[in-house]
Each structure stands twice: as structure tokens, then as C-alpha cells.
């Protein structure tokens, strides 16, 4: 039996991003989940099954989740199988994000309900079924959690992330000038230092 680190990527990402974390967890098997579904009712089943299978093979699982991968992970009901979670630029209030995007697109709830799905000019599809699912399935999360958040995150406000961290007793680390997508050399150095610090 061994210890595993499971990486769940965000939109547009891939399981191969897990390679970055191997040097940070040298005593663990680092695995990227290449999930194939993209609605919360489908990813819930897919991620839960994958974590359950991994749990049967490992002594402990550490989760690293990025952006919407965080929402998918929390929605999957896997917290009892996770020893610790690292959330990078997490989407922690999906309903608020959808409502924000509806405002950006000038779409009302009545209009979305009538059309079902509305395409936006900024590349996101708004879905009535998705919004209803999120409202009907509030997040339940009870696992030691550390959060990395950038001051220039354009998807989640500081108030939203702070409220989540306080509610779930999570450690919140704030990077001045950090973005939603941590990708520059400076940002990745900060991310690596954050993980190393959380391991102590």
C-alpha cells in the first residue's frame, strides 16, 4: 500500500499537469485524473468512482484541484476519502459564478429557463439545468483544506473565497498579483513554496 496525490485539472487543463507536482511529493504516487465528463451530475459519478478505486489501493490520498476541478471534486462527495486537499484558484460558489456570468451576458433567469442553454460572447454556455443542479446540490465539504488565491482572480471574488475558507476552516493563502490561472514563473514559484509550507 502507498500514498497517492490525485490532481484534478480545471477547464482547458489536462491530467498531464500532474507532472509538475511529482517533485513536491516525492514519497507519493502522483496521478492526474483525465476526466471525460463536464456536467456536475456526470463528473460527480466519474470522480467519486475514480477516488473510490484509488482509495482501495492506497493508504491515503491527497487531493490537488484547480479551478472548476475544485467544484467538481467537492460535488463528488469524496471528502471522507481524502486526507488533505490543496485548492488552487478554486470555484467554491458555482451558483454565484453562474449568476455573475448571466449578468455579464445580460441574461435573466426567465430567459435562461425558456431557452435551456444560451451561448455567450465570452465562450461559456449558460445552462438552466446546470444552475438548477447547483441549487439543488449544495456543497458539503469536511476535509483539511488549504487554498491558494490570487488577487487578480477574475472568476471568484475575495469575499467569496474568504467566506468559504472561514466556513470550512480552510487555510487561505493570498498572492498579490496572482491570477486565476497560475502559470508564470513567479506564480509557479509561489505555488510551490505554498505547497511546501503547507506540508510542514
Image (cartoon, rainbow, N blue to C red):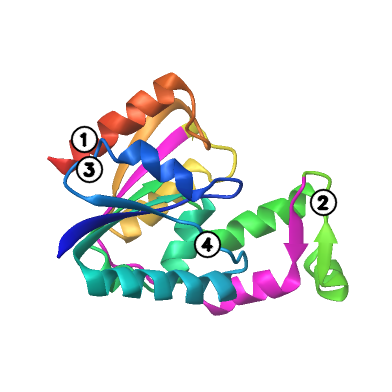
Q: Position of residue 8 (x, y in %)?
A: 44, 54
Q: CA distance from mark 2 to mark 4?
A: 25 Å
For disc 1, the marked residue is: 196
Q: CA distance from mark 3 to mark 1?
A: 9 Å
Q: CA distance from mark 3 to mark 4?
A: 22 Å
Q: CA distance from mark 2 to mark 1?
A: 39 Å
Viewer-nearest residue: 49 or 177: 49
Placement of 80 over or under 160, stated as above or below: below
Q: Which residues are magenta?
A: 123-150
The residue under the point 78% across, 44% down is: 122
Where does the C terminus fall, quadrant-wise?
Answer: top left
The residue under the point 16% across, 46% down is: 27
For disc 3, the marked residue is: 25
Q: Is residue 51 visible?
A: yes
Q: Is residue 89 visible?
A: no
Q: Are marks 4 and 1 in contact (CB under 8 Å)?
A: no
Query: Which mark is drawn over residue 35?
Result: 4
Mark 2 vs mark 1: in front: 1
Helix, strand or loop under label 4: loop
Indicate which disc, 3 or 4, sits on the residue closer to the N terminus. 3
Q: Position of residue 6 (x, y in %)?
A: 34, 56
Mark 1 crowdedness (10 Å alpha carbons): few <14, some 14-19, many ≥20? few
Indicate which disc, 2 or 1, sits on the residue closer to the N terminus. 2
Indicate which disc, 3 or 2, sits on the residue closer to the N terminus. 3
Helix, strand or loop under label 3: loop
Viewer-nearest residue: 122 or 183: 183
Query: Which mark is drawn over residue 75?
Result: none
Placement of 160 over or under 47, stated as above or below: above
Amino acid at each position: 500500500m502507498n500514498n497517492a496525490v490525485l490532481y484534478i485539472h480545471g477547464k482547458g487543463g489536462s491530467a498531464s499537469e500532474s507532472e509538475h507536482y511529482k517533485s513536491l511529493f516525492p514519497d507519493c504516487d502522483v496521478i492526474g485524473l483525465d476526466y471525460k465528463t463536464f456536467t456536475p451530475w456526470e463528473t460527480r459519478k466519474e470522480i467519486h468512482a475514480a477516488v473510490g478505486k484509488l482509495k482501495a489501493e492506497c493508504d491515503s490520498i491527497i487531493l490537488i484541484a484547480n479551478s472548476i476541478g475544485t467544484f467538481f471534486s467537492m460535488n463528488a462527495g469524496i471528502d471522507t476519502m481524502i486526507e488533505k486537499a490543496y485548492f488552487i484558484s478554486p470555484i467554491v460558489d458555482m451558483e454565484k459564478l453562474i449568476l455573475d456570468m448571466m449578468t455579464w451576458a445580460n441574461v435573466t433567469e426567465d430567459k435562461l429557463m425558456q431557452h435551456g442553454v444560451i451561448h455567450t460572447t465570452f465562450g461559456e454556455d449558460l445552462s438552466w439545468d446546470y444552475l438548477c443542479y447547483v441549487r439543488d446540490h449544495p456543497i458539503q465539504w469536511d476535509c483539511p483544506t488549504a487554498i491558494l488565491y490570487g488577487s487578480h482572480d477574475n472568476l471568484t471574488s475575495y469575499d467569496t473565497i474568504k467566506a468559504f475558507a472561514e466556513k470550512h476552516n480552510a487555510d487561505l493563502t493570498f498572492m498579490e498579483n496572482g491570477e486565476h490561472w497560475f502559470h508564470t514563473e513567479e506564480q509557479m514559484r509561489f505555488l510551490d513554496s505554498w505547497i511546501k509550507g503547507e506540508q510542514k
